[in-house]
Image (tube, rainbow, N blue to C red):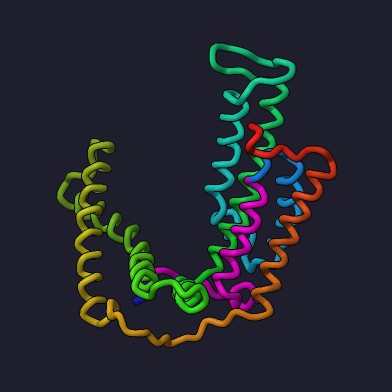
């Protein structure tokens, strides 16, 4: 039973091993978290913006999928702007709010860094099919099959949360309980959803054990997970983006190692 809509498309990115996508996102993230400066994050974001055209996502789908990142980035930047470490000329000061040249620079760097790390991670994850990811983790990285299949089973049930929430809401409205007390209704529905999820998870675990998913014997796989030239090429693209961002930041003198903060 497929609960989540499989990631599929004619573009090459959909056929690349999910392990390579995770490795690429990790390489870029590690390079960007080492320094808090706007140059490295800006260079990485510019390179990623060009690559997004080959991600296989329409502009509308790209915006909807990455909307949480677009909300989190300015929120984090405003927080750093108002409460960051003061340095340089002061522009505004009221109680705990302190806007200076240093906090402005840090806010811009934070904004760009959140976008540069979050956007490619979300885009690459959108193009991953959960079953392909499980195959890659078990066959390529040699992770324990019991852990991988258990995670896959749980991930497949995530899509049911929305359906269960809607069913609970309709059931309560049919009983005349959903017209007032929004906060109380939300807490009650959340608790009901938690109980329902625990019960479904227990049934899924029992069913998987009954079918031998917890057997210690070596498993076979219906689909082979391949890791070849296109996966290596994607990782090299991530390494190139990371190297370009770090190299540009160091050469321009903007490199700001996080350990010095």
Q: Looking at the image, can residue 6 be seen?
A: no
Vertical order, 138 against 79 (above or below): below
218 or 194: nearer the viewer: 218
* For residue 43, side relative to residue 185 (left or right): right
**Residue 203 % position (x, y):** 20, 69
The majority secondary structure of the magenta stretch comes to helix
The residues colored magenta run 4-33
Q: Identify the residue at horizontal 25%, vertical 82% (top origin).
A: 211
The residue lying toward the viewer, choosing from 205 and 6, is 205
Q: Is residue 31 magenta?
A: yes
Q: Up-down: is 207 above or below 180?
A: below
Which residue sits at x=52%, y=48%? 68
Give coordinates of residue 209: x percent, y percent.
Answer: 23, 76
Examine the rendered structure and indicate whether residue 24 appears above or below residue 258.
below
Q: Is residue 134 left or right of residue 150?
A: right
Residue 198 image offset from top left, x and y in percent:
22, 59
């Amino acid at each position: 039973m497929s609960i989540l809509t499989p990631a599929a498309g004619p573009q090459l990115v959909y056929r690349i091993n999910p392990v390579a996508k995770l490795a690429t996102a990790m390489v870029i993230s590690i390079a960007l978290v080492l320094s808090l400066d706007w140059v490295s994050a800006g260079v990485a974001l510019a390179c990623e913006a060009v690559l997004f055209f080959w991600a296989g996502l329409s502009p509308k789908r790209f915006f909807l999928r990455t909307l949480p990142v677009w909300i989190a980035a300015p929120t984090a930047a405003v927080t750093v702007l108002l409460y960051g470490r003061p340095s340089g000329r002061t522009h505004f000061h009221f109680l705990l709010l302190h806007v200076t040249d240093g906090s402005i620079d840090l806010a811009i760097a934070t904004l760009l860094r959140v976008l540069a790390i979050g956007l490619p991670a979300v885009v690459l994850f959108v193009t991953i099919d959960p079953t392909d990811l499980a195959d890659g983790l078990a066959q390529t990285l040699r992770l324990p099959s019991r852990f991988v299949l258990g995670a896959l089973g749980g991930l497949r049930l995530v899509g049911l949360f929305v359906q269960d929430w809607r069913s609970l809401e309709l059931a309560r409205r049919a009983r005349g309980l959903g017209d007032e007390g929004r906060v109380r209704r939300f807490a009650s529905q959340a608790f009901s959803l938690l109980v329902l999820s625990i019960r479904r998870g227990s049934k899924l675990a029992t069913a998987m054990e009954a079918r031998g998913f917890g057997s210690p014997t070596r498993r076979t796989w219906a689909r082979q997970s391949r890791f070849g030239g296109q996966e290596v090429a994607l990782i090299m693209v991530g390494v190139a983006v990371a190297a370009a961002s770090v190299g540009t930041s160091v050469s321009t003198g903007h490199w700001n190692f996080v350990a010095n903060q």
